[in-house]
Amino acid sequence: MSATRRLFLALWPDTALRAAMVERTERARLVREFGGRRVPAHNLHLTLVFLGNVAAERVDALIDEVGQSTPPGPFTLRLDRFGTFPPARVAWLGAAPVPAALALVEMLIGVACRQGLRIDARSWRPHVTLVRGIDARPSGLLPALDEPIDWAVRDFALIESIPGRPYQVLRTWPVE
Ligand code: 2AM
């Protein structure tokens, strides 16, 4: 069996955005309300397309094809809501999917499919997972997010997930 690498395409926040996400998590006392553990600040991200296990020898072609594609241009995501995915036991910070962001996701799904990868067909819900392992039946109500975070997106990244290590940015591309 050939080696595989677990990959995803994501928006990768800068230091100030990470700090703002941590601050909102703490201010809303998400862990106290829902249980679980905070995602470390250095791992916070917003997934565009989860690629899963990719054969190692296909990664260069994938990178080349993303680089040759024409992305839709810059956009701003307003992270303005908390939410949970109870089956996945996560709490998150989410945004409305603005058209340019959707166009970027579609472009990347197109690349992934042409590269022979099978992509989850569920519709994209832009979110940054803040807490993992929340209680199966959390007693807390979702707090309101009184101060949204505006994320001016200028680039996106290919990320590798290796168990026990911080996510690793393999490559970034501008959105214009
Ligand atoms: P999550 O934050 O909601 O768990 C790396 O695992 C990233 O890819 C996470 O942001 C995760 O979303 C996302 N992802 C999407 N589909 C996934 C899947 N089937 N398995 C694992 N992660 C997935």
Image (cartoon, grey):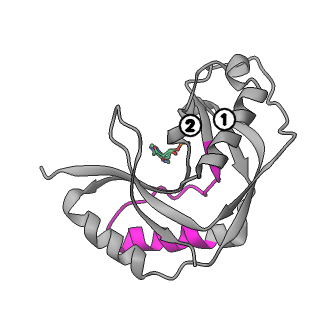
> What range is drawn magenta here?
103-128
Q: Magenta span has 87?
A: no
Provide the secondary structure element on which disc 2 rests.
Answer: helix
In the rendered image of this protein, does residue 55 appear above or below residue 6?
A: below
Name the one closer to the observer, 41 or 81. 41
Numbered label attached to residue 41: 2
Which residue is at 62% across, 43% downward?
Answer: 18
In the rendered image, which residue does mark 1 sit on? 22
Q: Which amino acid type is marked by label 1?
A: Val
Which residue is at 47% across, 61% downward?
Answer: 157
Q: Give percent across and percent down for residue 29.
A: 75, 23
Which residue is at 67% across, 21% downward?
Answer: 31
Q: Give percent across and percent down for residue 172.
A: 45, 65
Residue at the left extreme, as displayed: 1
User: Is ligand 1 closer than 8 angstroms to the Cβ of mark 1?
Assistant: no
- How packed mark 1 is, by other alpha carbons closer than 10 Å (few <14, some 14-19, many 20 or more), is some
